[in-house]
Image: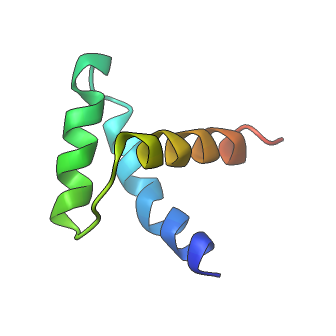
Amino acid sequence: MYTALLILTIEPLLLSINALPKSLLIPTETRIMGSFGYIMTGQFLAFLLCKHFFITHKQ
């Protein structure tokens, strides 16, 4: 349940971040998540992005 809520919380942020150039992606996403109280390592961020990709492209 917690994972589903986390994904629903992050989903709008990821969609807005996808419009940014790739060179800005990681620092920008880390700052946005940090402003919501998330402390993310690069490995955890990569995990979330992969999970988001597989969920949205599952069909």
| Residue closest to the eye, 48 or 17 | 48
Q: How is the protein colored in the picture?
A: rainbow
User: For the N terminus, which image quadrant?
Assistant: bottom right
Most extreme residue toward the bottom is: 1
Residue at the spot x=70%, y=48% of the render?
A: 55
Residue located at (32% from left, 54% from top): 40
User: In the rendered image, which quarter is residue 33 located in?
Assistant: bottom left
Q: At 43% from the left edge and 59% from the top edge, which residue is drawn?
A: 10
Where is residue 13? Give x, y as percent.
35, 52
Q: Where is residue 49 in the image (x, y as percent from the top left)?
A: 51, 41
Q: Quadrant of the C terminus?
A: top right
Q: Position of residue 25 (x, y in %)?
A: 29, 30
Q: Horizontal and vertical percent for residue 27?
A: 20, 35
Q: In this view, does 50 lie above or below 38?
A: above
Task: Identify the residue shown where x is 37% and y is 40%.
Answer: 42
For the image, the number of numbered tags is 0
Up/down of 58 relative to 13, above or below: above
